[in-house]
Amino acid sequence: MNSAHQCFCDLAPFYVLDLLDEAERDWVERQILEIPELAEEFHQYEVAATALPYGADLKEVAGDLKGRLFDALNLAPPEDISPVAEAPEDSHLFTVRFRDIQWKAHPVPGVEVSIFYTDRIARRISGVLKASPGMQYPPHRHRETEEIYMISGDLRIGTEVYGAGDYIRSHPGSVHAPYSHDGCMFFFNTSMDDEYFETERVLS
């Protein structure tokens, strides 16, 4: 496949299915950066790819499949381990009171986070981020849509300044490096697979 003779609509679906070589992937990413409108088109390909497995017929899993897999790999079967925390059977809610938030130091200086929910299937993560005055977040590219709801303080993205009550949605492929002059706190829902240019992935 030669990207020089392809349009974005030809290569983007193969990018989503991870069927491109490195040069072709770079070409698609450059197109998204140079033409922001393509980010939404790219997102639609991602949505379509996510739905593909649900079109297959459901098959019943053999009851002894797990044991046979471990036998084939010459591994001892793991012990059954209960979840670290499990909600009562009659509970339909998981809640965190503000006073009970447990902050964890973040690799970025001046930043603490509290993770409320991690979906390792969808590769999504949500929680609250707290930044000290002068916090500079590293440049990064969003793998998927990110949502932020400002609780307090200021968050500066490019030339815009956002404060308490503001909602910010970053589209797939967008790149920025937020800064806070006075410090801030916000709720976020984002991908676990964003690309960081000056540091390794920091949310995991």
Image (cartoon, helix red, strand yellow):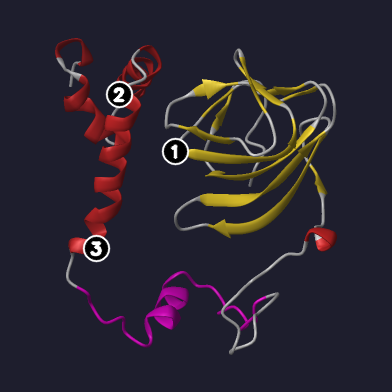
Give amino acid for label 3. Answer: Tyr
Q: Which residue is mark 3?
A: 54
Q: For the magenta stretch, what is the residue range?
A: 58-83
The amino acid type of the residue labelled 1 equals Glu
Let me know if residue 43 is in the magenta part: no
Q: Position of residue 169 (x, y in %)?
A: 50, 35
Q: Is residue 18 visible?
A: no
* First-in-chain label (2 vs 1): 2
Front residue of 23/135: it is: 135
Cα gap from disc 2 to disc 1, whole angstroms: 13 Å
> In the rendering, at what x and y percent does residue 54 appear?
24, 63
Q: Mark 2 belongs to which amino acid?
A: Leu
Question: For the view shown, which residue lies furthest in the front direction?
Answer: 165
Disc 1 secondary structure class? loop
34 relative to 133 in the view: left or right: left
Residue designated by label 1: 144
Q: Residues within 10 Å of mark 1 (few under 14, many from 20)?
A: many
Dot 3: what SS? helix
Using the image as rendered, state which of residue 51 and residue 3 is in the foreground.
Answer: 51
> What secondary structure is the magenta-colored segment mainly?
loop
Is residue 62 highlighted in magenta?
yes
Q: Which residue is mark 2?
A: 38
The spot of residue 91 in percent (x, y) is 60, 83
Residue drawn 62% across the image and 35% down it: 201
| Residue drawn at x 52%, y 57% as measured from the top left | 120
Tell me if label 3 and label 2 are in contact, CB under 8 Å. Answer: no
Rendered position, 134 above or below 117: above
| Residue 75, picture quadrant | bottom right
Q: Which label lies toward us, 3 or 2?
A: 2
* Up-down relation of residue 134 to residue 52 (above or below): above
Residue at 26%, 47% in the rendered image:
49
